[in-house]
Amino acid sequence: MKFFVDSADVEAIAELNALGMVDGVTTNPSLIMKSGRDIIEVTKEICDLVDGPVSAEVVATEAEQMITEGRKLAEIAENITVKVPLTWDGLQACKTLSSEGHMVNVTLCFSVNQAILAAKAGATFISPFIGRLDDINIDGMELIADIRTVYDNYAFETEILAASIRTANHIAESARIGADVITAPPAVIKSMVSHPLTDKGLAAFLADWAKTGQKIL
């Protein structure tokens, strides 16, 4: 499974990248706003830091303007993935941009039908939103599983990018189901290391070591 970091915080991305935990990055207008930086500037910095795909999102709602914005974003770096919403106009933009050789991430997916359309339109990635479905009492993991089944049935090449991930359990379940990629905030990725038995075991080892009175260095 590939790990994408859902952030525009360059320092947080760099920390994870140094550990080999970053296969790509996803951004969106909200994350750019939180960074307080110019979209072109911060996206270029992220692209220079990360070897894998970096999603940069269009803000237009009509197909032709999405295509124009997508082409502009794609000029930032070779590893840019143009992010478009899962609307009819977004699918039109996806088809055009993917036909031109650009990677495209179709975002805000909430149904299998939408995922099928995105694959047919040539999407590189489809981004089903797990957490937002959970928020309205729909199991987001079921959507990931259903898309996995359909994509495997027809050998669609579009990669499933599990998004709107809120917890480490979301990541584990996405891996179990077979999502190709997850994208999560840095804090959620770092939380994967935590387990109370690890903490308890380490405390016991250190207490026993202190009783020996020894030092390694």
Image: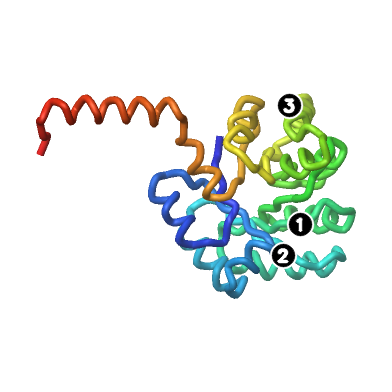
Q: Position of residue 41 (x, y in %)?
A: 55, 73
**Residue sitting nearer the eye, 199 or 93:** 199
Q: Amino acid at mark 3?
A: Asp
Q: Which of the marked residues, 3 or 1, is nearer the chain's N terminus?
A: 1
**Position of residue 117 in the picture relative to residue 165 (left or right):** right
Q: Residue at x 10, y 31 (%)?
A: 214
Q: Residue at x 83, y 35 (%)?
A: 112
Q: Which of the marked residues, 3 or 2, is nearer the chain's N terminus?
A: 2
In space, the residues marked 3 and 2 are separated at their CA atoms by 29 Å
Q: Position of residue 163 (x, y in %)?
A: 68, 44
**Residue sitting nearer the eye, 127 or 120:** 127
Residue underneath mark 3:
152
For the C terminus, give its image quadrant: top left
Q: How is the image coloured?
A: rainbow
What kind of element bears circle 1? strand
In space, the residues marked 1 and 2 are separated at their CA atoms by 8 Å
Residue underneath mark 1:
84
In space, the residues marked 3 and 1 are separated at their CA atoms by 24 Å
Residue underneath mark 2:
70
